[in-house]
Image (spheres, rainbow, N blue to C red):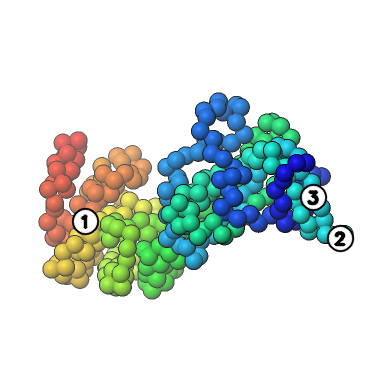
């Protein structure tokens, strides 16, 4: 080899092939993996094309969490000469790669692009490191298979679990606190799944309540006052839906609630989110006086009021923004809140459809 890169590295074996893991300064990433601006047909590439829309989001994550960001390793193939010189009889040593060699990212191209973008804003990032797993490049077919293998079996974290584990998202933190503070939610909210089976022991997912809270606050921030508002609102909703309390007290089976009523549906929880926004935007409304009237609402699916709003005529559930708005409008009307001009227009259109 002529001139070469020298990386402190650890050698490992997978499927009978050597691979090497090294900590590489971030400032070297643009040099090792130059950006490819040339268009190449998919069948002649070993990876997907960069989705430019993802870069700002990942970059902002790095910049906003400068003291706590974390990234998993990049995976890369080397097309060229390299050798490993161990220290004594160990798998730790120096990984030497010819500077003429070509490095190809098999997994992590969006992370790499976002890191480069972040370094343009904060050059001190260049001194930090990321782990790279290096493999020998055995041709296009092998690289394409590596890309498939590395991505095919990756399982996306559920939105509910992501909300549960997210300590940076203020609304997520507030949602977790609300669920823990309200007995009905604490007992019947699944904190891991996004979709519940018909025999689930739970009625809601944490993601359902999180989305409703987003509708209430219509933003990403959540102050201490907002947390107090959310807790008061959801406690009043819980206390004044008779069927929820009956389930909590075990006088109404969960199965009956799920099958016969609309108040375990995502569309209804989101409608409560829209309802909460009315009180959030207008503090002159006495929330307690209005929400006690939830006790008087007929939540049965068989109630014709919900047809075309919350459920179709065939009984299937609606879950569009329009159905959320129409469900909310009905609730508002039944508890004595005035409808907005937009809601009045939606009501008119619903009557015409009927």
Give coordinates of residue 329: x percent, y percent: 19, 52
Give the total of numbered labels: 3
**Which structural element holds mark 2?**
loop
Give coordinates of residue 63: x percent, y percent: 44, 58
Viewed as shown, does residue 344 lie left or right of 230? left
Q: Which residue is located at x 62 percent, y 44 percent?
A: 32
Question: Which residue extends farthest front?
Answer: 3
Residue 84 badge: 3
Viewed as shown, does residue 216 lie left or right of 2? left
Q: Which residue is located at x 78 percent, y 57 percent?
A: 93
Choose the circle earlier in sequence order: 1 or 3.
3
Camera-side residue of 256 and 123:
123
The N terminus - image quarter = top right
Give coordinates of residue 304: x percent, y percent: 24, 47
**Which structural element holds mark 1?**
helix
* Crowding at mark 3 (Cα within 10 Å: few <14, some 14-19, many 20+): some
Camera-side residue of 167 and 197:
167
Is residue 120 at all visible to an observer of this figure? yes
Give coordinates of residue 55: x percent, y percent: 45, 46
* Crowding at mark 2 (Cα within 10 Å: few <14, some 14-19, many 20+): few
Q: Cβ–Cβ below 8 Å for labels 1 and 3? A: no
Viewed as shown, does residue 78 lie left or right of 49? right
Q: Which residue carries the number 2 mark? A: 88
Residue 331 badge: 1
């Amino acid at each position: 080899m002529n001139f070469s890169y020298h990386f402190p590295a650890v050698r490992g074996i997978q499927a009978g092939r050597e691979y090497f893991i090294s900590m590489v300064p971030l400032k070297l990433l643009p040099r090792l993996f130059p950006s490819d601006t040339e268009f190449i047909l998919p069948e002649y590439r070993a990876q997907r094309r960069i989705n430019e829309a993802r870069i700002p989001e990942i970059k902002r994550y790095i910049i906003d969490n400068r003291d706590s960001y974390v990234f998993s390793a990049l995976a890369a193939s080397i097309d060229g000469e390299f050798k490993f010189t161990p220290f004594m009889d160990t798998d730790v040593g120096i990984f030497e790669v010819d500077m003429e060699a070509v490095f190809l990212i098999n997994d992590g191209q969006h992370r790499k692009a976002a890191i480069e973008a972040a370094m343009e804003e904060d050059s001190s990032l260049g001194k930090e490191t990321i782990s790279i797993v290096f493999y020998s490049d055995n041709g296009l077919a092998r690289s394409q298979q590596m890309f498939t293998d590395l991505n095919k079996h990756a399982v996306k974290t559920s939105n509910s679990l992501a909300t549960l584990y997210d300590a940076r998202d203020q609304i997520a933190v507030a949602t977790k606190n609300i669920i823990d503070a309200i007995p009905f939610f604490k007992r019947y909210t699944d904190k891991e799944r996004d979709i519940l089976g018909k025999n689930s022991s739970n009625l809601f997912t944490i993601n359902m309540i999180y989305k409703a809270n987003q509708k209430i606050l219509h933003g990403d921030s959540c102050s201490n006052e907002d947390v107090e508002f959310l807790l008061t609102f959801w406690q009043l909703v819980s206390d004044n839906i008779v069927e929820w309390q009956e389930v909590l007290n075990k006088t109404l089976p969960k199965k009956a609630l799920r099958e016969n009523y609309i108040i375990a549906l995502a569309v209804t929880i989101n409608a409560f989110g829209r309802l909460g926004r009315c009180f959030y935007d207008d503090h002159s409304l006495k929330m307690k006086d209005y929400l006690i009237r939830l006790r008087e609402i007929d939540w049965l699916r068989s109630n014709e009021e919900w047809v075309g709003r919350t459920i179709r005529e065939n009984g299937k559930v609606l879950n569009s923004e329009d159905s959320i708005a129409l469900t909310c409008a009905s609730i508002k009307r039944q508890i004595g809140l005035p409808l907005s001009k937009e809601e009045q227009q939606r009501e008119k259109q619903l009557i015409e459809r009927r």
